[in-house]
Image (cartoon, coloured by chain):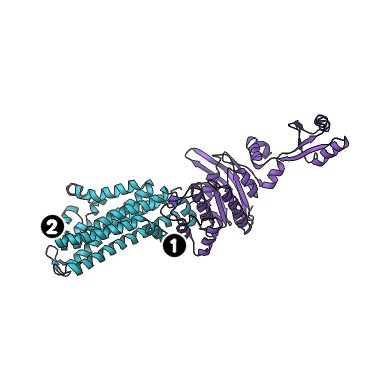
Chain colours: A purple, B cyan
Amino acid sequence: MENADNLLQVQHLEKSYGSQQTLFDVNFNCQTGRIIGLVGANGAGKTTIMRAILGLIRYDGTIFMNQAQLSFNHNQQPDQIGSLIETPGLYPYLTGREHLKLFLNPLKSNSQHITQLITDFRLEKFIDLKTKKYSLGMKQKLGIALAFLNQPQLIILDEPLNGLDAQATRDLRALITKTSATGVTFLISSHILSELQRLADDVIVIQKGRVVKQTTMSKLLDQSQHRLHLKTNDDHQAEELLRAAHYIVSFEDGLLIELTPDKTVETVVQLMAKHQLAIQDMRHLDDNLETAILKMIDEPEAQNA
Amino acid sequence: MLNLTRQESYKLVKKRSTLIFIIILVIQNLAFTVLSLKIAKFFPARFLFAGNFGTISTIQLITIATAASIVSSEFDYQTLKSLIPRTSSRQVILISKWLTILGYTLSLLLLTSLITLLAQLFFFQDIFSLTDTIPELGIPIWQWWLTNIFGNFVNLWLLLSLVFLLAALFKKNSVAITVGIVVYFALPVVGTLMGLLIHKWSVLKWNPLNFLNYPLQLNSPELMAKITNLSTTQLLIGNLGYTILFLSIGLFFFARKEA
């Protein structure tokens, strides 16, 4: 069970608010240096899991970080987790720079790191303004920069893209990838699944307080549906040939063919060539993360089977 | 703990209200100095001197409000969720706030005491000397002055411990500030009634409000002992005991707060 590569281990995590249970026997591991996407519908329990890891709420079950157990009110590893949970908590009477100075741990970081964060997150234009004057995007950028401060081993970001423009989103993606390469682990929740698909190495799918699936992004996408959109000089004949060869085909401005391990692009092309049908256009259509997740949430039992 | 106390002090210093309060105290101190020089009949210098020219009461109000907001603002600004993962426990967060307010209280008292001393040195040397004896108490003015500051300081911390407790319980500073100030102003109003009740039911002398009479009893030990039914030493120990009790209860509840 103990794996030295596992920075974080969540075991049998349960949480109730009064009589309302929100987490049910949640188990997952986060490996060192990986970017883990925590996905699920609103109210699935993503933020509650993050809050439990941070010790912000009481919970049942055990959470280990670096093989040491975390608890609600006893933190043996202060500053080892950087976080942004929901909206950034900022003091309106302090500037952005003062926030960074305030939370700087001199034992782990220095003022050069602050300068670097200001540059990396492009905070220069507003870093010396009081945060009460910040827009949502500015607050979000500062909140994320604070999560990166003091070089934590684990960074938890809950909906980090809220309020960020395209440039800031791209910058953040690059920074997360760069920081992860240095061995920092990320646990990220986001509704923008296309971004998460580009970023995350692993995916944990949460539905109604339960882990539906934990897998790698590549495996998840590999297991999802792959289709081929095909146009020939005679689509009707092509359709008949494909059906006769037991391909699943639908007609949609050309032919939509479902690919399987034994029914590949190559076999389709060979079949068309054998019957002297000319291919005019061909495109690969793969499910994206969003489609894969939606299917999983619709049919969790099938996925677990 | 040291780092957290440094952080709390930094936040306090950066608040605009901190500077405004200091300005108010300095202006009050100087204004009463001038009034005492100009209208000595209504503003007798030695009595005003003993209360740091009225600023001790102002400091009490300021620190009640500041103590309430130093706790509740973490809930209001949702900053507790940033603080908790950076610290070893919730208790450490609250204790660092106590220490910050302790330092703040002492700094304000020191500032106003210094101004008071300078005022005496420059403007009231001809009117009274620090070594003059107060006939009613039989002690020199300097001793009366220090006793007054000490008594009010002890009393203030009893109030502040209650404010810290309420701020931890209710998350809203308005509740803590209101109760703190109401208790502060309630004593003169209910004092007589409380004295009568204590005479009738002796056990009531142990209620926390009675211990707020400590500074008064320091100035008039015999008279006040008849009202409080407690010795001055008992009042001091009671003040400290209640302060520790309220702080501990506040700590207990704060340690269980979810963020």
Picture layout, residue A99 above or below residue A225 = below
Identify the residue position indicated by label 2 in the image: B42
Identify the residue position indicated by label 1 in the image: B3
Three-letter code for the amino acid on which mark 2 is drawn: Phe
Residue A204 at x, y percent in the picture:
62, 45
Disc 1 element: helix
What's the distance in space between the residues labelled 2 and 1, CA to CA? 48 Å
Residue A175 at x, y percent in the picture:
59, 55
- Tell us which disc is closer to us: 2 or 1: 2
User: Relative to the observer, which residue lies in front, A94 or B217?
Assistant: A94
* Observer able to see residue B237: no
User: Relative to the observer, which residue lies in front, B70 or A73?
Assistant: B70
Mark sitting on residue B108: none
Dot 1 alpha-carbon crowd within 10 angstroms: few under 14, some 14 to 19, many 20 or more: some
The total number of labels drawn is 2
Q: Earlier in the sequence, mark 2 or mark 1?
A: 1
Residue B38 at x, y percent in the picture:
14, 61
Residue A172 at x, y percent in the picture:
58, 52
Q: Is residue B160 left or right of residue A263?
A: left
